[in-house]
Image (cartoon, rainbow, N blue to C red):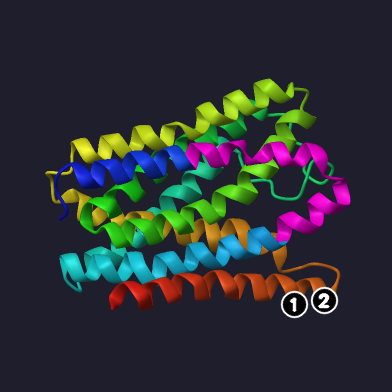
């Protein structure tokens, strides 16, 4: 496990960058509905591939290497998948990636609560990877960040459509994203415990759930064949980027 001030700096820096990504939703203000629709779905497909690539090429292999090829690793993966299924059902919340006219949600505060919880757990997971290996942390953060961009664009448009001012939507979206840093600092505080190794497969289950259950259904049934091909190519690109990072970091 990586010790000292270096992983803490990586945790804080990556968390602040994730908070900055929460402001990306402001670009929706200058986009037409058609442009937003055409932009979001390819980004969603890219993020789905990135999340799955991060889970299968980085997080699960690293967990097996650190803990041994034991059934407990896969139990934690399934546990992470199941936990986020339960979390989403309890909150009656689902990420919206399709723009304001295609996804009207009156429960704007539920969106923020769900995002806050998700970012908190994501911060713990990403910090855990930095504590084990900086390179693993970078690849995990990139996979998480790829998901945040389309999510934040969609969420911001929903909040504004729900009657919030742009300033209020940005401020509370940023506050929700700040729980990522809180989770990261919590993970660092308890980094002396071996439980951190089992947090990685748990987070991998989270990545698999979001990618397979939350994102892929958004992009695999478009009415246009050419758009479906584009989404598939974006999905594969996300996978290949994380595979490439695995190959580079392994050398």
- Image location of residue 41, percent across then percent down: 72, 59
Question: For the residue labelled by badge 2, is the local secondary structure a helix, a strand or a loop?
Answer: helix
At x 61% / y 34%, what residue is drawn?
111
Q: Is residue 174 above or below residue 99?
A: above
Q: Is residue 160 left or right of residue 128?
A: right
> Which span of residues is magenta-colored?
18-41
Relative to 173, does residue 53 appear above or below in the rendering? below
Residue 28: say if magenta: yes
Which of the 4 quarters of the picture holds residue 184?
Answer: top left
Structural crowding at the residue carrying mark 1, measured as other residues with C-alpha within 10 Å and reported as few (<14), some (14–19) or many (≥20): few
Please say if 95 is above or below 79. above
Asked whether disc 2 touches disc 1, contact meaning CB atoms under 8 Å apart, the reply is yes
At 80% from the left edge and 41% from the top edge, which residue is drawn? 100
How packed is label 2: few (under 14 Cα within 10 Å), some, or many (20 or more)?
A: few
Query: How would you classify the magenta stretch by its main secondary structure?
Result: helix
Cα separation between marks 2 and 1: 5 Å
- Residue 54 in view: yes
| Disc assigned to residue 167 | none
Visible in this render: residue 204? no
Which quadrant holds the C terminus? bottom left
Residue receiving disc 2: 226
Which residue sits at x=79%, y=36%?
A: 29
Quadrant of the rendered structure where residue 38 is?
A: bottom right
Q: Closest to the observer: 66 or 15?
A: 15
Q: Nearer the viewer, residue 77 or 154?
A: 154
Q: Is residue 77 magenta?
A: no
In percent of width and height, residue 81 lies at: 43, 56
Element type where label 1 sits in the image: helix
Badge 1 is on which residue? 229
Residue at 55% across / 53% down in the picture? 147
């Amino acid at each position: 496990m990586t010790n000292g001030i270096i992983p803490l700096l990586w945790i804080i820096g990556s968390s602040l960058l994730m908070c900055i990504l929460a402001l990306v939703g402001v670009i929706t203000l200058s986009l037409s509905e058609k442009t937003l629709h055409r932009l979001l779905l390819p980004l969603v497909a890219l993020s789905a591939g990135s999340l799955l690539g991060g889970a299968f090429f980085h997080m699960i292999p690293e967990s097996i290497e650190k803990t041994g090829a034991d059934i407990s690793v896969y139990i934690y993966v399934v546990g992470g998948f199941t936990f986020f299924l339960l979390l989403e059902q309890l909150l009656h919340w689902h990420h919206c990636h399709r723009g304001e006219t295609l996804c009207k949600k009156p429960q704007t505060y539920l969106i923020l609560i769900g995002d806050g919880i998700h970012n908190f757990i994501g911060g713990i997971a990403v910090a855990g990877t930095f504590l084990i290996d900086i390179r693993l942390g970078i690849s995990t953060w990139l996979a998480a960040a790829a998901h945040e961009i389309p999510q934040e664009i969609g969420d911001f448009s929903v909040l504004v459509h729900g009657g919030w001012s742009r300033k209020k939507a940005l401020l509370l979206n940023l506050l929700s994203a700040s729980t990522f840093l809180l989770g990261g600092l919590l993970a660092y505080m308890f980094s002396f415990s071996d439980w951190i190794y089992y947090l990685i497969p748990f987070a991998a289950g989270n990545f698999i759930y979001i990618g397979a259950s939350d994102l892929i259904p958004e992009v695999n049934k478009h009415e246009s064949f050419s758009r479906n091909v584009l989404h598939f190519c974006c999905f594969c690109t996300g996978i290949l980027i994380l595979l490439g990072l695995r190959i580079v970091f392994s050398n």
